[in-house]
Image (cartoon, rainbow, N blue to C red):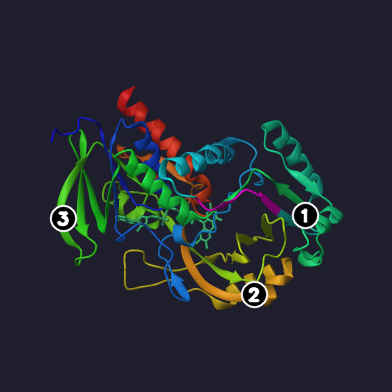
Amino acid sequence: MALSTKPRVVIIGCGIVGAAIAYELGRGERFDVTVLERQPKAPAIASGAIATYRTGTPGALGMLMGAISQKIQGRAWELREASLRRYHTLIPELESLTGTKIAHNEHGLLKLCGPGDDLAQWEKLAMQRKDQGWPLEILGTDAIAGTYPQVSMGALGGVAFGIHSPKDWQVQPISLLTALVSGARHHGVKFSFGTTVTALDPQGGGIRVELADAEKGAAPLAPIGADWIVVAAGLGSSAIAATVDASPVQLQPVLGQAARLQLERPMAMREPAITGDDVHVVPLGGGSYWVGATVEFVEFNEKDATTAPIPDPDRWQTVLEAAIALCPDLASATMGQIWSGLRPRPVGQPAPVIQPLASCDRVWLATGHYRNGVLLAPATAEAIATALRQAAFA
Ligand SMILES: Cc1cc2nc3c(=O)[nH]c(=O)nc-3n(C[C@H](O)[C@H](O)[C@H](O)COP(=O)(O)OP(=O)(O)OC[C@H]3O[C@@H](n4cnc5c(N)ncnc54)[C@H](O)[C@@H]3O)c2cc1C
């Protein structure tokens, strides 16, 4: 078999960010792309009443809060807008390529605001978004009560107004991740699960990637070579970068708890994802809902596999009660699985971190997406693909 002459890219991590980059880089078929992931297979929803994830993607609710965010310019908005645009083409493209449905909700997001929220500020944002091509509909109390009977107007100390964002969607992260892996494979991307990257070693014009078998007691595996590395390893990114860079990015774990609730039937005909006071109610169809999420700053050593971050049951109870206050029908729901996951939050710089290492411009970081990794995965993938194409082919 002839050896590939394409530039070799190794992506470390197959969460939503690594998988999106793999798909985007694979799509052009100009690179020889390999994804290395220490878990035995692509992240999946664990079975059982309680699940604890040491990564972000399997825990995420998949809210794409782009147009409805208060970011209006600069990098924060540009990434959001690029992602939203790409989502509207990516989902049909992947569905057609892989022949599978990607579970997502196109009814938009409904944000509920209380008496303390600034209506004038939201009206100003709606004007700006209109100019940007992302409509936001400001709703008065009558419109909310008439259109969305699942909402309690007594929530938030009295719902004062709402904002419906029809172009912000919600996507089920594992469904999307599975399609991205399958789509990337279709374009020749190779995946190696159960493989931990232990170190990077820049040598001459390339990088030597040191590996261990995650399933066989971390036994060393034969190293591989790459021309470029993309570190998309979530909270594991710092340790990998530290093998090359003296002062790598610092990431803090922020735990989030969420759960699935089941009703006998859907709460209403029209079911956007609902958010109020930072609590989300995500309809999944058939009377199923995800509710979340807590924001808990935890002490946790990512490198020590024997330690686990501890979710706070009181914080979860507060979120559950807030969700029931927003949508009172949820009080009679059967409680399904509850889970927690860890969000990678950058310390000392804004999220996300998309940049080369200071000491080696062949190693790119694509990490630190904190609360918006699902939202920003497509824009991150485009940014990395653009940078590597320029570096390799310009
Ligand atoms: C409860 C909860 C709700 C959330 N809701 C939303 C939401 O509504 N919308 C949104 O946009 N975001 C949401 N998020 C945030 C989102 O989940 C994260 O930002 C996102 O998952 C980060 O993705 P990632 O691919 O960078 O990291 P991860 O998903 O953590 O993936 C990193 C991967 O790298 C692998 N890895 C690590 N180290 C190594 C190594 N040395 N070698 C090989 N592989 C390695 C890990 O096993 C892992 O699979 C939520 C998070 C939580 C916990």
Q: Residue furthest front?
A: 99
Residue at the spot of label 2: 333
Q: Which residues are magenta?
A: 102-110
Residue 218 position by quadrant: bottom left
Q: Label 2 is placed on what type of residue?
A: Ala
Q: Earlier in the sequence, mark 1 or mark 3?
A: 1
Which of pointers 2 and 3 lies earlier in the amino acid sequence? 3
How far is disc 2 from disc 3 in space, using C-alphas? 49 Å
Indicate the secondary structure of the residue bearing disc 3: strand
| Distance from Cα at disc 1 to Cα at disc 3 | 56 Å
For the C terminus, the quadrant is top left
State which mark lies toward you, 2 or 3: 2
Say if 151 sits above or below 108 in the image.
below
The image quadrant in which ligand 1 is located: bottom left
User: Which residue does the image show at 63% across and 46% down from the upper left?
Assistant: 168
Q: Which mark is residue 117?
A: 1
Q: Amino acid at mark 3?
A: Leu
Q: Position of residue 160 (x, y in %)?
A: 82, 57
At horizontal 36% and vertical 26% (from top left) the residue drawn is 390
Using the rendered view, name the quadrant where residue 212 is placed.
bottom left
Q: Is residue 181 above or below residue 29?
A: below
| Coordinates of residue 28 in the picture (x, y in percent) | 36, 31
Q: Which residue is mark 3?
A: 221
